[in-house]
Image (cartoon, rainbow, N blue to C red):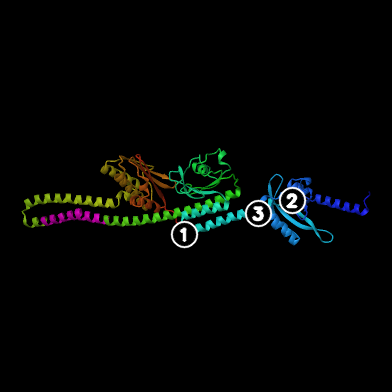
Amino acid sequence: MTSSPFTQWTEEVLWQQAQIIDQIHEAVISMDLNGYVTGWNKGAERLFGYLAQEALGRHISFVYPEDQHTVLHQEIIKSLLEKGNYQTEVRMRRQSGEEFYAYLSLSLLRASDGTVTGMIGYSKDITSRKQTERELQTRIQQQATVVTLGQLALTGIDLSELMEKAVALVAQTLAVDYCKILELLSDEQTFRLRAGAGWKEGAIGQAIVDAGRDSQAGYTLLINEPVIVEDLRTETRFRGPKLLEDHQVVSGLSVPIYGQKRPFGVLGVHTRKRRFFTTDDVHFVQAIANVLAEAVERKQAEEQLQHSHEQLRALAAHLQSIREEERGRIAREIHDELGQALTALKMDLVWIKKKLSTGNERSSRALLTNKLHTMSMLVDSTIHSVRRIATELRPGLLDDLGLVPALEWQAREFQTHTGIRYRFLSCREEIALEEDRAVAIFRIFQEALTNVVRHSQATMVEISLQEEAGGLMLEIKDNGRGIPESKITDTKSIGLIGMRERALLLGGNLTIRGIPEQGTIITTWIPLHRTKQPGELS
């Protein structure tokens, strides 16, 4: 039976419409009012992986993950039936099981009389866009975390509290299982878990990690750059320390926390599941580490300043005490030696006066000769005492002959009075030096020799005076027992503090190093000429 022209025309229109829908790149799916698929274009085949014959007649829920079925029925279909059209973004699933994000635009299908006959939907994969949005949101959150921590650091918050907040914020922002701050200990061989988030009770403050290249943290400091671990179980650059093994760590990222003279430690994040950390993640963790490094440096500077103030107070008190002791000593020596000598001379002069007025000429002459000889010896002794006292206050050699002869004279005096041998080496026989610099070097030398006598138990002192880098380098090295590190930094070591301050006041420096049972080396460098201070007028 031949179809009527109208029927043929209708079929032709429907066929053309089907062809047009198939030409649309995105998925176009039609359904009946119960949600069963009645149309499935080529775009739907490409997007979901199902051929049309595999999809037709099935309920549309087969392209949704199970946890999205409630959203499909109670939100999408219900809203569409109520409003007539509906747009949303939803998670969907391909035939392979891969999930992706899609944009949906749905409308109701109506007959010519307006009766609702079904539904039609347009779907587009927006996974890439959603991923970009998530990455952007994550980056914004990471930057906000860095700002928050930086503002906290500027408030002067306690360093330990700042570290605790840092690990909590980092763990939350990156959604990781663990975050840690490992502090490099003074032996530079081990780390201590200073702060952390997610670790077992008792680990923080107690857990020790090797700082060698066999651990991730040690390797991080060795190469001095961030280290990413995708799977610790297959890692070949280093082994996982016990701390990570005990917490079933799989992936991780660690960065150095830099310091002024040496690294403070390592900031690290870890997960129990395999994870790939992005470049943005690396930049974020390093930014947090830099905030911590600045806070640590600021704290250390404050402690050094406080330590310096304590040293200066102790030095000022000591100098006042020394000044009073020196005044007392000089007064006693003047009284005991010069006073007694002058009293004796006075008595002798009285005796001479009496003899001249009462005695006969011959006998008086002999007595006078003896008395004058005694008086002459007493005057010589007095002159010697005056010279000795003056020399102790300020050696005349320093003014008359210069620094090098004065140092050699002091070394000879040192050997004469202590029996400790010396070896003196100078780059030149004389060095032109401003008075305050020569005095400072001489006083440092005197104090160094005093320490040798009091503490070193040495038998030999080697002294070297050399020109170096526009300044004068004085090194005093003994073969004694070696000064302990605790004494070098002790605020009660007033003599050492005084030596440092003398050098610093002239723009120089002084270092002290002790080697157990081998000796102590004191090295001071002072510029040959005074340098102009910033803001100082010519």
Give the Cα distance between marks 1 and 2.
Answer: 85 Å
Check disc 3 and give the amino acid type. Answer: Glu
Residue position marked by numbered label 3 in the rendering: 133
Q: Residue furthest top?
A: 236
In-front residue for pair 444/472: 444
In-front residue for pair 5/41: 5
Magenta span: helix, strand or loop, mainly? helix
Residue position marked by numbered label 1 in the rendering: 535
Residue 330 position in % (x across, y down) = 24, 55
Residue position marked by numbered label 2 in the rendering: 59
Q: Nearer the viewer, mark 3 or mark 2?
A: 2
Which SS class for mark 2? loop
Q: Is residue 132 left or right of residue 271?
A: right
Residue 227 appearing in the image: no
Query: Which residue is drawn at the image coordinates 54% and 57% (left, top)?
Result: 148
Query: Which residue is drawn at the image coordinates 39% and 54% (left, top)?
Result: 307
Instruction: Indicate which disc, 1 or 2, sits on the residue closer to the N terminus.
Output: 2
Q: Nearer the viewer, mark 1 or mark 2?
A: 2
Instruction: Indicate which disc, 3 or 1, sits on the residue closer to the N terminus.
Output: 3
Instruction: Indicate which disc, 3 or 2, sits on the residue closer to the N terminus.
Output: 2
Q: Is residue 341 left or right of residue 122?
A: left
Q: Which residues are magenta?
A: 326-351
